[in-house]
Image (tube, helix red, strand yellow):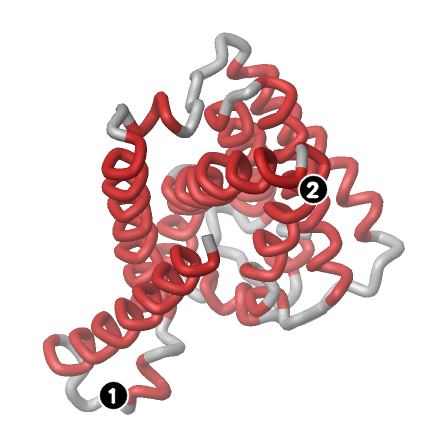
Amino acid sequence: MLLILGVSLFTIFLSQLAILFGAHFLFYPHTPLNDLAQLPMVLLIAQCLIDISVAIYLVLLVEGKYHTGFWRAIQWNWPQSAWKLLGLGALMLMGLTLLESILPMPKDTPFEKLFARPRDAYLLAIIAVTLGPLVEELFFRGFLYPVVARRWGVAWAIFFTALPFALMHLQQYGYAWGAMLVIFIVGVVCGIVRAATRSVGASFLVHAGYNGTQMIIAVVATQGFRNMPKGLIQLCLR
């Protein structure tokens, strides 16, 4: 498991470098690499390509190891009560918003820079409710969860999938422990749903409902990402 995780992280690192240098030589030859690495469009395209690469890697790995269909092997099991699970994600956002009101949350984060222009903001919103939660749930609740659950039990599996899930998002929120706690709780809830329903599809819907509600609030509050006063996006996404 550690070997697979290490290979995944190394592959992501190489992919980021390749995308950065490719963008520099093909589209931004006069832009320094340090500045290029901060461009929202480059970051978003890189994230899309990395997510797709991770998904393909997981499919090949699982089907090669278990010699069965990928979706069956990870227990995707698309649930019938999809709207209820999306609603659970929305309710989780509302509840965690109350928690955030008493936690020390960052006022300015790297994540906020991705909303600099409406085009970038809409692309991020699409990723946040589709590819992002899909790949994260496939990896953490589809691939990692059953490995840990078989060895140490369901409770530890929920914990050890929520913790790296939160750590992965830490840089986006300026390494603030309050934001990490909120994301950790999101991971715990998704893990509980995964355990209760035996369905990665169910945890994906909860995750997508949580992110989707955030984005809907952001779109409405900023009038379609056109009115972007400082701090407003961060407030919408908390």
* Residue located 53% across and 43% down the image: 215
Residue 71 horizontal/vertical position (percent): 34, 25
Residue 177 horizontal/vertical position (percent): 75, 65
Between residue 59 and residue 26, name the one nearer to us: 59
Q: Is residue 22 left or right of residue 179?
A: left
Furthest toward the front, the residue is 151
The quarter holding residue 64 reads top left
Relative to 144, is 105 above or below? below
Dot 1: what SS? loop
Work out whether mark 1 precedes mark 2 in sequence or the reverse, and give the earlier one. 1
Residue 27 horizontal/vertical position (percent): 14, 76
Amino acid type at circle 2 is: Trp
- Identify the residue position indicated by label 1 in the image: 31
* Residue located 71% across and 68% down the image: 176
Task: Give me the disc on residue 156.
Answer: 2
Residue 202 horizontal/vertical position (percent): 53, 23
